[in-house]
Amino acid sequence: MENNTKIIQAIEEYCLKHPSTYEARPFGEYPICYKVMGKIFAQFNPTERFYKITLKCVPDKSSLYRQLYPGIVVRGYHCPPVQQPYWNTINLNDFFDLDMLFQMIDEAYDAVINKFSKKARTELLNLSELEFKDTAGEDQDFAMLCNRLDSALDEIVGGKFQRSQYEQYNQRDCIHDVIVAYRKGKPIGCGSFKMYDEDHAELKRIYVEPAYRNMGLGAEVVRRLEAKAKINGYRWCILETGKPLEAACYMYKKAGYKIMPNYGQYADMPDSICMERKI
């Protein structure tokens, strides 16, 4: 299959068309990984030197494709032996059937989501109805959601300590990486990050409208922010939350975040909880 911009774009667009799929680059510039709810189903390397795609599969199908395309479809490249029955690598220089490749991508996606729990499948169904927009701090939908976040925080913790001390650290004009989630054109959730230092991206302003909570949207926003931060060269994500925000603390812990010593401006704020995760 010819290595050209048109074919590469077709493959990338086809991977991203699958419900709730997003791009990540956890291993460096390449491969480009495509994830659904944090799980990789495709790893695409579009370079001339290594023009290949590695796809998730079930063992029976993986063996069949290797028999049909000997030497072209092989066991997953660089996968540990225990994982090789579940991944195939296709040499795209010698594979010429784009429709068959698309079928394999469909099967890769299905191989991942079919392993999801019933709860995760329900979350995926709900998330599949949403659209996610990459934007920046001046975005008006993001501004509206941030105002609602502030109102919600005032209700939860405003009577327990003065939140004004935090306002200077949540200004939108210094936030350049934002994700806003929409359902039927209505903004219902958001999240962002900003540079803390060269290695650390600080997650900020993560919020989901009350009517859309308990569907996994907050965790999905965090996953997408982490993927974006990794693409931008960061190695860690850090964040600050508060002791009264039990639901948020639970979500972050479930996502793999661990409590760390309070950093920077939060060092002397006893009601703050700071957390980190290597991405």
Image (cartoon, grey):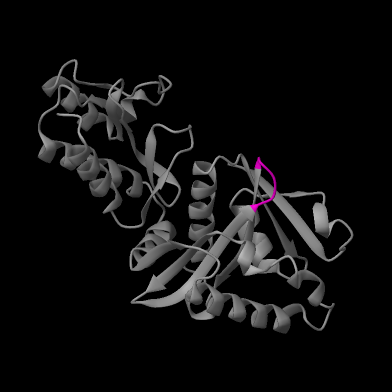
Find out whether residue 196 is within the magenta segment.
Answer: yes
**Image quadrant in which you'd find residue 148:** bottom right
Find out whether residue 248 is within the magenta segment.
Answer: no
Tell me the magenta residue range: 195-199
- Compared across the picture, whether 50 is left or right of 275 comes to left
Q: How many marks?
A: 0
Name the spot of residue 122 as percent of width and height, x first: 38, 63
**Image quadrant in which you'd find residue 4:** top left
- Compared across the picture, whether 263 is left or right of 49 comes to right
Task: Using the image, determine if residue 159 lies above or below residue 35.
Answer: below
Residue at (84% x, 79% y) in the render: 160
Task: Using the image, determine if residue 209 lies above or below residue 237.
Answer: below
- Compared across the picture, whether 186 is left or right of 179 comes to left
Q: Residue furthest top?
A: 71
Quarter occupied by the N terminus:
top left
Residue at (20% x, 27% y) in the render: 92
Name the spot of residue 197 as percent of width and height, x first: 69, 45
Name the spot of residue 167 as percent of width and height, x first: 74, 72
Q: Toward the viewer: 107 or 15?
A: 15
Residue at (48% x, 53% y) in the render: 224
Name the spot of residue 28 as percent of width and height, x first: 48, 32
Task: Using the image, determine if residue 180 lies above or below residue 156.
Answer: above
Task: Using the image, determine if residue 94 lies above or below residue 268.
Answer: above
- Compared across the picture, whether 53 is left or right of 28 comes to left
Quarter occupied by the C terminus:
top right
Q: Toward the viewer: 190 or 18?
A: 190
Give the main secondary structure of the magenta stretch. loop
**Image quadrant in which you'd find residue 200:** top right
Residue at (59% x, 42% y) in the render: 234
